Every structure is written in C-alpha cells, then in structure tokens.
Image (cartoon, helix red, strand yellow):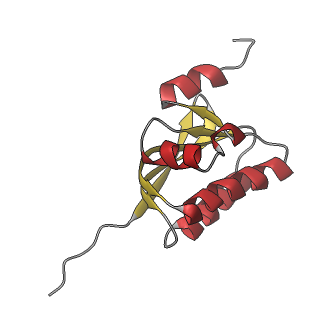
Amino acid sequence: MTAVQAPRLESRATTVGGASAIAVTGELDIETASQLSDEVERAVWRTVGVFVLDLSGVTFLDSSGLHALLRARAFLGRADRPLVLVCPPGPARRVLDLASVLDTFVTYPSPEAAAAALVPADE
C-alpha cells in the first residue's frame, strides 16, 4: 500500500488590497510550473487591474518556476496590467535575487504591505 502524497503545489484564489490574487504554497519547479502558468492565465481572463501572486508559502523555486513567474509578468504586461509579487525573505526571494530578476517585479514582503500599497490614492 502506498501513502497518499500531498500535492507539491497548491494555490488558491484570494484578494490582496482589493486586487485579484493567487496564493501559492509548496514547490514551484519543473513539475509544477505549468500548473501555475495555467492557473494564472485562467485567473487573469476573469479579472481586471493589478494581479498579485503571493509566494509567501513557496518552499522551493527552480528555473522552471522562475520562468513561470516571468511568463505571468509578460502575459499581464500584454494586457497592460501590473503583476505584484508578495515575496518575503526565503527560498523564492533568494532565487529571484540570485537570478538578478528581483528588480523586474514589484515586490512586497507581506500581503499586508502589498495591500497597503495597492489602496487607491483617493481613499
């Protein structure tokens, strides 16, 4: 009998500061990157404005996962929509920094910090 393995990547739709978001938990790698890309594209079609990826729960990020994040940024950019990453210190931020692409994204260290920055100026 084999044990049931937990999914390597889980995501859930949420909001951050009123913006549509996906919170990601687990490993973002060659086996799960296409899953995230598909989920982002489906979510983007159903939403407008800023889109947030919350990477707070990401425990591992490889080059395929990095490519999925860059692909999400490009996909949103074609629609003239910004992508914001919630990326606290940890595995995901370390890889983004080592790959010299951290500055390519608008990042915040927590969902609360992102929400505060995303509040419309007239409120």
Direction from residue 96 to residue 72 in the image, left or right: right
What is the x, y in percent for residue 16?
Answer: 56, 33
The vertical placement of 69 against 49, above or below, is: below
What is the x, y in percent for residue 37?
Answer: 63, 63
Seen at 75% across and 12% down, the residue is 122
The vertical placement of 113 against 62, above or below, is: above
Nearer to the camera, 22 or 100: 100
Nearer to the camera, 95 or 16: 95
Q: Quadrant of the C terminus?
A: top right
Identify the residue at the far bottom of this view: 1
Seen at 63% across and 21% down, the residue is 117
Identify the residue at the far left of this view: 1
Seen at 61% across and 30% down, the residue is 18
Seen at 68% across and 40% down, the residue is 105
Direction from residue 74 to residue 123 in the image, left or right: left
Direction from residue 103 to residue 25 in the image, left or right: left
Number of numbered markers: 0
What is the x, y in percent for residue 21?
Answer: 58, 43
Q: In which quarter of the image is the N terminus?
A: bottom left
Nearer to the camera, 44 or 57: 57
What is the x, y in percent for residue 118?
Answer: 65, 25
